[in-house]
């Protein structure tokens, strides 16, 4: 009887050790996002990045879980702690608003890597901050807008004047002014990231006020794109993701974030024993930002506009053109 | 130029206000009957999805917008029925049940969207049309005669709601069960039945209001499309002192303030945007603060379940 009991105990112990060993092999990533994985903007861009990383490493090496709609910091904090206690190796809180939450939680879990963005501060050794240079792509889109507009009125449908939106708007305005001194860039904010009805209303107001090229950031922008698409001869310049699937005849070009590189860099750092403390940049130079033209309609814009954009892009990449956002 | 801007502000405010009027009128009925429903927001989300989905599956064919809105009314009434079952039949605490219904609606709408649509998709929806001849009238034309059909339907519902509430037996019963349910019961009015009817009606209106957002305003559906409008409408019922005209006035004022602040930003008037964005809410608070003791107008039995067995 005693032998059987010992045998069972040994088997259980062996299984536990085996499970731990196997679990060590696999990288478990948790993603906390403010909206949903299909918002066609900020959150989906990161989700796609994770999927791309998983495809590269293999599903047996990287698994991930996602918690959506956690714009509320209290709920997000509870989810992050739960993930931390359930053996996840990397926890990504996808928004600038999560920085203080991570600063509070990260010291309790020193072997777990936390990441957030847009941001540059890494207040703990196990926090990564990722930082898309939204101003770079925005500058290029600004050039496109400045050369395409006929009314010389360009509208921005903004979410909240913070983080990414500030960098994007400043870069965009500079891009417009670099090629068209007469053009006005009019910015209006909804005061929210996810209110697509308000974004639609701002787009309507912008169009009534004469805007013929519009742009905007965050997940609410899909509401605005649809309204722009209902008018003939107007264009939208997209950010975060290539949004031309919503309006193939309206979305002229896009700045798309490639978050896969950020995830791979975090994984590589961990393999070298570095759990955080790095400021990870996404730029045109390192491939974190991509400029995507809509081939279907890019031929409609004035001659030379596309070339001007590509020229500026090359200058940004080689460092001869810097976009100041201060 | 200034005249054009002002007309633009007003003509943009009218369609904006419709969502609030639809939810607000329905909520007014159920509050008059003694039940407040904080779940209107959740019902709106499901209504927004169902309305969108029906039109989407019919590929925006003829009549699909109307059918979408009818389907939203149906699903809204069903969700109102759930609220009525929980709060009127089972006497649950109305505030908590309302919040639960809101979360249920948000979850169900989001899940259905992911399962049956799976990504951002657009529909044609109900577009604004210029009424021949009338749309050319200066000032009034762009404000009243260049809107989508639902604007006219909703504006017609306001006097209809007043008539139902004040000139029909059913309306008097609804007011009675929300003011003095025991007395109404003594006079042979079926308290629970009347309350259930009001809550179901309000659910139907909230469903329609949701479909208005997806079919008439954005021509698409996305997660959390309502963004708190259902809760604002509940507040506007208090603001409107439980009267259809008050709800309409509140909704118009709130929407005008929103339209105004957006125009301030778009036309580049130097004004902090943070203040502009909260301006409509500040305005409502200020008007509420100066509008006297609105609480004395509240239905006396609002929020109180009626226990027939406890009659003296």
Image (cartoon, rainbow, N blue to C red):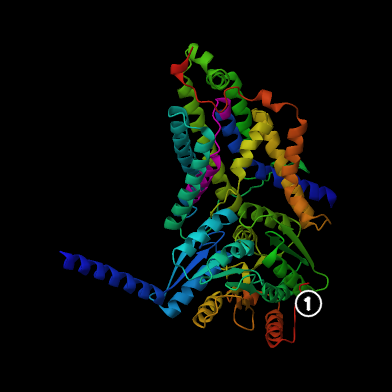
Q: Quadrant of the C terminus of chain A?
A: bottom right
Residue A160 counted in the magenta span: no
Residue placed at 59% from the left, 56% from the top? A73
Asked if residue B110 is positioned above or below residue A318 in the image, the reply reads above
Q: Main secondary structure of the magenta part?
A: helix
Mark 1, chain letter?
A
Spot occupied by residue A252 in the image (x, y as percentages of width and height): 63, 71
Relative to B276, residue A261 above or below: below
Decide if residue A286 is in sight here: yes
- The x and y percentages for residue A121 are 67, 71
| Residue in front for this viewpoint, A310 or B107 | B107
Q: Residue beneath label 1, please?
A: A179
Q: Quadrant of residue A157?
A: bottom right
Q: Residue B34 in magenta?
A: yes
The residues colored magenta run: B31-52
Q: Please identify the quarter of the rendering in which residue A41 is found.
A: bottom right
Q: Is residue B248 left or right of residue B120?
A: right
């Amino acid at each position: 009887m005693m032998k059987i009991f010992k045998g069972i105990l040994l088997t259980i112990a062996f299984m536990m050790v085996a499970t731990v060993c196997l679990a060590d092999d696999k990288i478990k990533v948790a993603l906390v996002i403010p909206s949903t994985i299909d918002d066609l903007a900020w959150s989906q861009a990161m989700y796609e990045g994770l999927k791309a990383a998983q495809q590269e490493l293999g599903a047996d090496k990287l698994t991930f879980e996602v918690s959506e709609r956690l714009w509320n910091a209290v709920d997000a904090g509870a989810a992050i702690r739960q993930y931390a206690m359930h053996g996840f190796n990397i926890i990504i809180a996808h928004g600038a608003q999560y920085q203080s939450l991570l600063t509070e939680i990260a010291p309790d879990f020193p072997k777990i890597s936390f990441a957030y963005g847009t941001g540059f501060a890494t207040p703990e050794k196990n926090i990564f901050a990722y930082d898309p240079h939204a101003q770079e792509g925005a500058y290029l889109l600004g050039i496109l807008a400045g050369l395409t507009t006929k009314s010389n009125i360009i509208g921005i449908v903004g979410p909240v004047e913070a983080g990414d939106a500030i960098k994007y708007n400043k870069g965009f305005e500079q891009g417009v002014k670099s090629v068209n001194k007469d053009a006005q860039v009019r910015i209006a904010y909804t005061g929210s990231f996810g209110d697509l009805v308000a974004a639609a209303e701002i787009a309507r107001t912008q169009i009534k006020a004469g805007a013929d090229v519009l742009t905007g950031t965050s997940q609410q922008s899909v509401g605005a794109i649809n309204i722009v698409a209902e008018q003939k001869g107007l264009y939208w310049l997209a950010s975060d993701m290539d949004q031309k699937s919503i309006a193939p005849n309206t979305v002229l070009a896009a700045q798309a974030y490639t978050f896969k590189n950020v995830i791979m860099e975090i994984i590589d750092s961990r393999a070298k024993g570095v759990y955080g403390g790095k400021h990870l940049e996404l730029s045109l130079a390192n491939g974190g930002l991509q400029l995507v033209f809509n081939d279907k309609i890019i031929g409609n814009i004035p001659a030379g506009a596309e070339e001007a954009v590509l020229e500026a892009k090359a200058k940004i990449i080689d460092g001869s053109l810097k976009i100041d956002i201060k | 130029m200034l005249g054009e801007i002002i007309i633009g502000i007003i003509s943009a405010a009218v369609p904006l206000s419709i969502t609030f009027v639809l939810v607000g009128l329905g909520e007014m009925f159920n509050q008059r009957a003694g039940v407040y429903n904080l779940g209107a927001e959740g019902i709106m989300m499901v209504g927004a999805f169902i309305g969108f989905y029906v039109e989407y599956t019919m590929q925006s064919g003829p009549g699909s917008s109307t059918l979408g809105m009818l389907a939203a009314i149906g699903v809204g009434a069903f969700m109102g029925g759930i609220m009525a079952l929980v709060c009127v039949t089972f006497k649950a605490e109305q505030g908590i049940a309302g919040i639960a219904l809101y979360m249920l609606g948000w979850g169900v709408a989001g899940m259905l969207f992911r399962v049956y649509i799976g990504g951002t998709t657009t529909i044609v929806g109900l577009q604004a049309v210029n009424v021949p001849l009338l749309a050319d009238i200066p000032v009034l034309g762009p404000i009243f005669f260049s809107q989508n059909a639902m604007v006219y339907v909703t504006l017609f519902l306001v006097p209809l709601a007043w008539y139902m509430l004040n000139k029909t037996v059913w309306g008097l019963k609804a007011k009675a069960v929300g003011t003095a349910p025991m007395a109404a019961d003594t006079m042979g009015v079926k308290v629970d039945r009347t309350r259930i009817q009001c809550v179901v009606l309000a659910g139907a209106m909230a469903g329609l209001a949701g479909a208005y957002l997806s079919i008439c305003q954005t021509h698409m559906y996305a997660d959390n499309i309502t963004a708190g409008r259902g809760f604002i409408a509940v507040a506007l019922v208090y603001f409107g002192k439980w009267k259809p005209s008050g709800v309409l006035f509140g909704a118009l004022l709130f929407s005008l303030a929103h339209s105004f602040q957006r125009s301030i930003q778009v036309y580049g008037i130097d004004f902090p945007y943070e203040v502009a964005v909260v301006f409509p809410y500040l305005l409502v608070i200020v008007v509420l603060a100066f509008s006297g003791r609105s609480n004395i107008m509240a239905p006396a039995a609002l929020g109180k379940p009626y226990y027939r067995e406890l009659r003296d």
